[in-house]
């Protein structure tokens, strides 16, 4: 009996220690996928690749892979649709890390009156009245709001989406820690957006790339195909590839 109990305890511990042990795979309904692979948990560089599939078929690469930048301190597990191993380092507000895992893709925001996109992809032209809350104490934490007046309160002014900043002139939402399952201090305002310094600068947690690459990505995204973003260090990607049914 003691031996059986010991074996059960070891197996249970292994399940919490290994993310591959969790019963998870990419949803069958998802037909588009952006894959980002970093060299390690502490790398701020990423290689991005776009995939599509039809029905239950295999993933097919679309176009060429391209380069991007991540958080200045690398990656940490984020809050998406994926399982997270017990004891894992989680993404926190202000930690300078990009969230790793599997995430739905949301709408786009930008300065242009219109952009090339699938008609089903929601696009909002940013104005001074567009707010995105990064204050964990706010009831609107990690949420977008458009108010009927120019920001007046300190809270509204602090949440105002960036104006006149080319790097933020176009962005696509990565649904990390997203409403309605938002958790305070778990990280906010995670997007794909334009990189700074031609890719010479890292980010606070977003995934950035050249403007042309971002525009091409947004033009490809079809909400009807339930697009996802998978971001992992290469070693974790390799170990999870089979169980998660990654490309």
Image: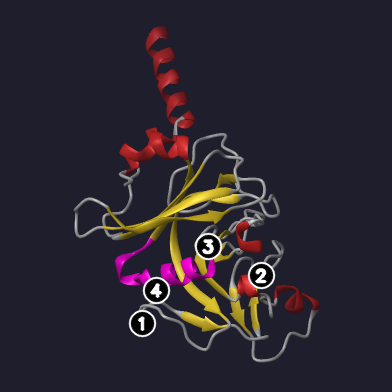
Which residue corresponds to mark 4? 219
Q: Which residues are magenta?
A: 210-227
**Labels 1 & 4 near each other (Cβ < 8 A):** no
Can you tell which of label 1 and label 4 is closer to the viewer?
Answer: 4
Which numbered disc, 3 or 4, marks the residue that appears first in the sequence? 3
Which residue corresponds to mark 2? 133
Q: In this orientation, which residue lies closer to the viewer: 48 or 155?
A: 48
Q: Principal SS element in the magenta part?
A: helix
Q: Secondary structure at mark 3?
A: loop
Q: Residues within 10 Å of mark 2 (few under 14, many from 20)?
A: many
Q: Secondary structure at mark 4?
A: helix
Which numbered disc, 2 or 1, marks the residue that appears first in the sequence? 1
Specify the quadrant of the image occupied by residue 228.
bottom left
Q: Quadrant of the N terminus?
A: top left
Q: In this orientation, which residue lies closer to the viewer: 178 or 45?
A: 45
Which residue corresponds to mark 1? 119
């Amino acid at each position: 009996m003691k031996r059986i109990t010991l074996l059960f305890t070891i197996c249970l511990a292994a399940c919490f220690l290994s993310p591959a042990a969790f019963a998870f795979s990419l949803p069958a309904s998802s037909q588009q996928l952006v894959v980002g692979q970093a060299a390690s948990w502490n790398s701020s560089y990423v290689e991005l690749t776009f995939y599509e599939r039809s029905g239950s078929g295999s993933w097919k690469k679309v176009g060429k892979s391209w380069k991007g930048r991540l958080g200045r301190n690398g990656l940490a597990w984020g809050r998406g649709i994926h399982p997270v191993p017990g004891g894992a380092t989680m993404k926190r507000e202000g930690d300078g890390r990009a969230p790793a895992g599997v995430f739905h893709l949301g709408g786009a925001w930008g300065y242009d009156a219109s952009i090339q996109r699938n008609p089903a992809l929601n696009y909002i032209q940013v104005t001074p009245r567009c707010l995105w809350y990064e204050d964990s104490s706010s009831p609107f934490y990690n949420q977008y709001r458009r108010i009927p007046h120019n920001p007046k309160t300190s809270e509204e002014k602090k949440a105002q989406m960036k104006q006149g900043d080319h790097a933020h002139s176009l962005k696509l939402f990565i649904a990390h820690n997203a409403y309605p399952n938002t958790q305070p201090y778990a990280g906010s305002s995670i997007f794909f957006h334009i990189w700074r310094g031609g890719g010479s600068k890292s980010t606070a947690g977003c995934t950035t790339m050249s403007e042309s690459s971002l525009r091409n990505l947004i033009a490809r995204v079809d909400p009807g195909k339930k697009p996802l973003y998978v971001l992992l260090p290469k070693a974790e990607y390799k170990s999870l590839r089979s169980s998660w049914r990654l490309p």
